[in-house]
Image: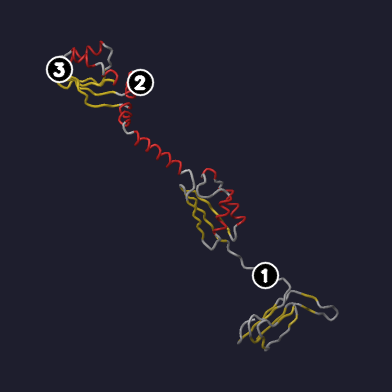
């Protein structure tokens, strides 16, 4: 209960006082008689004591000090009420501080910068249009951003994008992109086609497992000449297309 009362007095404010005179004991007795609460009471010397008293009770000490022929001097003021009173004369400063704090807090809730980081060539204007379409633009609330939906939109509509990530750091939105690696076209070796010379050369050896030979060993061929045709014709069958499996060796002028 006493602790609660001291906490209550701290909120209202209290002062540390020094009381000096020949009748300090009488001063203390009169305070107790008037129900004035003193705590941290201690004697400094034979004619001087120190104590704490609430801000409200301090105003009553004038008559008690006069009656006991003592002098009362404030050594320190404490409490929330004294702090508020100290800044009462600085209202403009206090109001400005509060307004600035609110503005700073409010501004951190919005997007003020968008960075697009990528490891290849991208149409950044297209990416920015997709971001804006999803509510990511300067001056927009960060809490309204749906990163998952935006990432899906970028991957679906962006060109040559294999991966996209969006990170929000403070008031910055950082978009990271990775370019898709185009795979080389895989040719089915069992597909029907002619075998042609890739460069000029001389045939040193050629074997056709399927198809029909058009050239023979020792022939000079030019780039684009057919070496093995996909057409095969039997003695008793019509011409038909087959896979032209082959083995060709060329020299001098280049490779088949």
> Residue 108 has which mark?
none
| Quadrant where the image shows the C terminus | bottom right
Q: Which of disc 2 and disc 3 is earlier in sequence? A: 2
Question: For mark 3, what is the residue?
Answer: 21
| Residue underneath mark 2 | 4
Nearer to me, 39 or 251: 39
| Residue at (43, 41) in percent of width and height | 103
Is there CB contact under 8 Å for labels 1 and 3? no
Q: Nearer the viewer, mark 3 or mark 2?
A: 3
How is colour applied across the structure in the image? secondary structure
Which residue, given by chain and number where applicable, does mark 1 sit on? 187
* Residue at 14% over, 18% down: 47
Q: Residue at x 24, y 14 (%)?
A: 31
* Mark 2 surroundings within 10 Å by alpha-carbon count, few (fewer than 14), some (14 through 19), many (20 or more): few
| Residue 149 image offset from top left, x and y in percent | 59, 48
**Vertical order, 238 against 171 (above or below):** below
**Tally of numbered tags:** 3
For label 2, the SS is helix
User: N-terminal of the two: label 1 or label 2?
Assistant: 2
């Amino acid at each position: 209960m006493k602790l609660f009362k001291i906490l209550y007095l701290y909120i209202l404010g209290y002062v540390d006082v020094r009381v000096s005179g020949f009748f300090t004991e009488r001063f203390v007795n009169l305070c107790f008689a008037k129900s004035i609460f003193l705590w941290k009471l201690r004697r400094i010397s034979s004619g001087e004591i120190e104590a704490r008293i609430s801000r409200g009770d301090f105003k009553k000490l004038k008559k008690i000090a006069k009656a006991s022929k003592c002098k009362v001097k404030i050594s320190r003021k404490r409490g929330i009420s004294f702090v508020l009173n100290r800044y009462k004369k600085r209202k403009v400063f206090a109001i400005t501080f509060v307004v600035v704090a609110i503005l700073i807090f409010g501004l951190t809730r919005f997007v003020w910068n968008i960075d697009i980081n990528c490891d290849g060539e991208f149409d950044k204007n297209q990416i920015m249009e997709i971001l804006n379409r999803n509510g990511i633009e300067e001056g927009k609330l960060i809490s309204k951003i749906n990163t998952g939906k935006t990432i899906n939109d970028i991957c679906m509509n962006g060109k040559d994008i294999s991966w996209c990530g969006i990170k929000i750091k403070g008031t910055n939105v950082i978009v990271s992109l990775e370019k898709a690696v185009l795979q080389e076209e895989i040719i089915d070796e069992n597909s029907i086609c002619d075998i042609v010379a890739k460069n000029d050369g001389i045939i040193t050896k050629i074997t056709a497992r399927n198809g029909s030979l058009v050239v023979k060993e020792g022939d000079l061929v030019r780039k684009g000449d057919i070496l093995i045709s996909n057409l095969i014709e039997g003695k008793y069958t019509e011409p038909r297309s087959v896979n032209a499996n082959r083995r060709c060796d060329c020299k001098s002028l280049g490779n088949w």
